[in-house]
Amino acid sequence: MLNNLDLMIIVFMVLAAAGLLALVLMFLVRNEKIKKASLYITSALGLYVGYISFRIFWPMFMGQFVIGAILAAAAIAAIVLSIAAKDNVKKFNIARILAAASLVLGMINAAF
């Protein structure tokens, strides 16, 4: 039978695998539609990890709570920047890097 710690590890592993797949697709595939879809998936996962940080760290660890809020805001900024970029490749690349950083740093913040 699984206890809460086992379930938390399973959820973390699923999030890490989905995030890694989205990051690989976002940076290695040449198709623009797949890049945009994986950007939105990465940003959504970054938002979810930010929400997890809100739920975990609210009463006691305000520093990590603020970091989670900043990273969730960065994921939202990546979505807005990708929509505003339209045909600008540099802005789209910045949005991809921002979404990837939001996801990776959010996972690190929530895990440690």
Image (tube, helix red, strand yellow):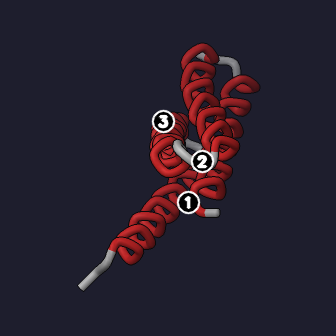
Secondary structure type for disc 3: helix
Q: Amino acid at mark 3?
A: Tyr
38 over 104 or under it: above or below: above
Q: Amino acid at mark 1?
A: Leu
Which sits in the foreground, 106 or 61? 61
Residue 107 appears in which quarter of the rendering? bottom right
Residue 111 point in image, percent of width and height = 59, 62
Label drawn at residue 71: none
The local crowd at label 1, few if under 14, some if 14 to 19, many if 20 or more residues have their Cα within 10 Å, is some
Closer to viewer: mark 3 or mark 2: 2
Label drawn at residue 103: 2
Label drawn at residue 40: 3
Residue farthest along the bottom direction in this orientation: 1
Residue farthest along the front direction in this orientation: 60
Secondary structure type for disc 1: helix
94 over 52 or under it: above or below: above
The local crowd at label 2, few if under 14, some if 14 to 19, many if 20 or more residues have their Cα within 10 Å, is many
On the question of residue 38 being in view, the answer is no
Quarter of the rendering occupied by the C terminus? bottom right
Q: Which residue is mark 1?
A: 20
Which sits in the foreground, 92 or 76? 76
Count of number-bearing discs? 3
**Residue under the point 66% across and 30% down:** 95
Q: Amino acid at mark 2?
A: Leu
Quarter of the rendering occupied by the N terminus? bottom left
Mark 1–mark 2 Cα distance, whole angstroms, equals 10 Å
Tag 2 or tag 3, which sits nearer the N-term?
3
Tag 2 or tag 1, which sits nearer the N-term?
1
Residues at discs 3 and 1 in contact (Cβ within 8 Å): no
The local crowd at label 3, few if under 14, some if 14 to 19, many if 20 or more residues have their Cα within 10 Å, is many
Which sits in the foreground, 53 or 94? 53
